[in-house]
Image (cartoon, grey):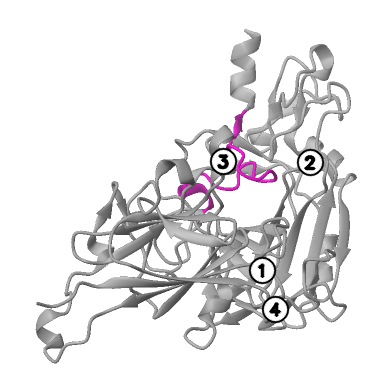
Amino acid sequence: MQKPVSIDLDVFIWPRDSYGLYDYESSKVHRNSLNIGTTCTLLRKEHEVFTSGSRPKDDLNDCKKLFNLQKLENGHYIVSPILSSSEKKSDRSEFEKLWLAVRGFSGSTQGYRLCEGDVIRLGRMKFRVKEVHGPSGDKHIQNFKLSDILNLKLQTESSVEDEMDFKQPCRICLSEAFSSNNPLISPCRCKGTMKYIHLTCLQMCLKSKINTRSTDSVLSFSWKTMSCDLCKKPYPQKFNISGKPVDLIEIPKPPEKYIILESICKDKNSNKGLHVLSFYNKSLLKLGRGHDCELRISDISVSRVHAQIDMIGDNFYLEDHKSKFGTLVQIKRPVALSQYDEYWFQAGRSLTKASVNKPWTMFCSCFNYTVSPFDYQYEGFQLFPINTGITLGKQNIQIEMYREHQNLLYDYNQLGFNSSYDEETSYVVKDGCENEEKNED
């Protein structure tokens, strides 16, 4: 009788507990080897790793849950994170966030293919991929310089035919005229004559609070807070104007070949930031703490040359540069263990190398599993392979909605609407001139 397929796990535990980091250069690590052939949860207690059900409940105190391993009906295995929307915040101390280590792709692929909505981590610094834009043949500009787009101005002019008058003026320009592209909105708690402001007037006022730093390939924008100077209410990052999401902070973008990274921070008092990485004149950009990196990240947990983003064809691939604390991509959806020979998962100070152990047989063609795990419906969600242009974030719709070169930011779980704070609920403020007129009447 043929033995069933199992999973070999090599778990390495770094003794230090520091910001959920794992030192890839340290030789002082504790190694645990497991062979698993059933559904279970992987747990860590101090320097030991074991599966759920292998210990009595009294011995599970002070354990950290790393991830779930589930065996499907067709014999394949999937790894899924512990974190879910149903769990309470008070229980989050019992498990670790699950990350995919990019270093595990070395030698087998070109790296991890970035897509909109991905959350990447370099050391303890987190970024969200806000926008990805590949090449466009009709927008190529000779002798293009990234610094030239800083001179672009907001288009505040509107056609006279589209303009209408409102009962109260804008508190900045004192004009009562508005249009569908430049409505009068009420973004804060201010009342009376200070209640309304043009969208473009608000955008122009907030531009003075933004610090800009530019190089040949990167534009960085940072700000402390975006709130009303009078009532102190924070402004939302997006408005829904006539059914279309509009960024409150408009930043200039290259015509093609760029990625926008958004800084993620838990502290509301920390600086927020957006980084525009242009691949117009280069196909490879380095990220790190060193002076020779195109995107400099000033943090001690980031290596001098930590990672790089390589543009290959129409796609962008993230590669680790043998960094000390690794380059990671956050996992929020199930991952099927069948696409690659080995997967590297990091959960806190634990690094797990998972590989599929298929039994050897002379009649492999007769006993191989012919059903793909990606045809399996996991709790109502479709399983997607890695590096297919689909983010590792949460799933809530079918694969038919995901096509190449589409903006996943709005269609994919509403990611990025208010993503300056980690794990915060996204929202959009619906505020337009038509709604305001009804409220006044």
Tell me the number on the disc at residue 25: 4
The reply to whether discs 1 and 2 touch (Cβ–Cβ < 8 Å) is no
The reply to whether discs 2 and 4 touch (Cβ–Cβ < 8 Å) is no
Identify the image quadrant of residue 24.
Answer: bottom right
Q: Residue at x 54, y 84 (%)?
A: 106
Disc 2 is placed on an element classified as helix
Tell me the number on the disc at residue 203: 2
Q: Position of residue 17 (x, y in %)?
A: 70, 57
Q: Position of residue 136 (x, y in %)?
A: 57, 74
Disc 1 is placed on an element classified as loop
Task: Please state which of residues 272 and 322 is positioned toward the viewer in this rendering.
Answer: 322
Mark 4 surroundings within 10 Å by alpha-carbon count, few (fewer than 14), some (14 through 19), many (20 or more): few
Closer to the camera: disc 3 or disc 1? 3
Tell me the number on the disc at residue 255: 1
Segment tinted magenta in the rendering = 409-430
Task: Please state which of residues 43 and 206 is positioned toward the viewer in this rendering.
Answer: 43
Closer to the camera: disc 2 or disc 4? 4
Q: Please state if 261 lies on the left or on the right of 213 as rendered.
A: left
Real-space Cα separation, disc 3 to disc 1, in angstroms: 42 Å
Real-space Cα separation, disc 2 to disc 3, in angstroms: 38 Å
Q: Please state if 396 lies on the left or on the right of 234 as rendered.
A: left
Mark 1 surroundings within 10 Å by alpha-carbon count, few (fewer than 14), some (14 through 19), many (20 or more): some
Residue 159 part of the magenta-drawn span? no
- Asked if residue 326 is positioned above or below residue 236 in the image, the reply reads below
State which tag comes first along the sequence, 2 or 4.
4
Q: Position of residue 154 (x, y in %)?
A: 78, 49
The reply to whether discs 3 and 4 touch (Cβ–Cβ < 8 Å) is no
The residue under label 3 is 92
Can the viewer see residue 10? Answer: yes
